Image: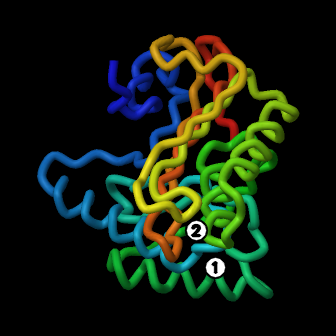
Amino acid sequence: MGQKIHPEGFRLGVTRKGETVDFRSSWYSDREFASLLGEDLKMREHIAKKLTRAGIADVKIRKAAEQGEVVVDIHTARPGIVIGKGGSEVDNLRGQLERITKKKVQVNVREVSRPELNAALVAESIAEQLEGRAAFRRTMKRALTSARRSGAEGIRIQCSGRLGGIEMSRTETISEGRVPLHTLDADIDYGFREAKTQMGQIGVKVWINHGIQDDSVEGRS
């Protein structure tokens, strides 16, 4: 079967359920859905452009129905870059987000304690090394070994594009351990990044298996 579905969205009602579920966006609207969704997309795009080298693992957005306040949680492996000297960078970011949303914005910076077990950060690390002309096989193997050493039950890494600068694009995949994509109880973390090299873009996909989860799911960040 094709792997066209997002592993986390596939498990929202099973592995990620109940009051402990941690959605990327938490708000409700019956009339202004399109404008609020566009607001979220603009904020995520701005954060991604401004904090390209900050190791952003995830951006979670919460909107209160009555107060009109927006809470943005930025999960990052390098909180110092996001915060800046004396909090100057995060204050600047807050002002820019308030201009985008025309609302009061609260920005919280959360540190990701184990970046080698976060699929988005592993994919970003591989993409950065590929942009620096590192050998793709060595880079993928190093990331795989680091995740397994840190306690991942399984990891799978896939790179697609003009690998090694060859004329024809191809796909290389390496894996170790168990990564059961069709087991809904398995906590599969998925990340995707693009490496913009001189030879073109290379897509990097990472699946990390954190094991079978109990009914109460806790956040990993």
**Crowding at label 1, few (<14), some or many (≥20) Cα neighbours within 10 Å?**
many
Query: Relative to 176, does residue 32 appear above or below in the rendering?
Result: below
Q: Is residue 59 left or right of residue 130?
A: left
Q: x, y percentage for residue 102?
A: 33, 79
Position of 37 relative to 147 (above/below): below
Secondary structure at badge 1 equals helix
In this view, the residue farthest toward the right is 149
Asked if disc 2 and disc 1 are in contact, CB closer than 8 Å, the reply is yes
Q: Is residue 201 left or right of residue 214?
A: left
Front-lying residue, 31 or 142: 142
Return the x and y of residue 51 as percentages of the image width and height: 59, 75
Residue labelled with disc 2: 107
Front residue of 209 and 13: 209
| Residue pictured at 58% horizontal, 68% vertical | 107
Q: x%, y% of residue 197?
A: 53, 72
Cα gap from disc 2 to disc 1, whole angstroms: 7 Å
Q: Amino acid at mark 2?
A: Val
Q: Residue at x 58, y 60 (%)?
A: 164
**Badge 1 amino acid:** Val
Q: Nearer the viewer, residue 127 or 19?
A: 127
Locate residue 151: give its quadrant: top right
In the picture provided, is 45 more to the left or to the right than 121?
Answer: left
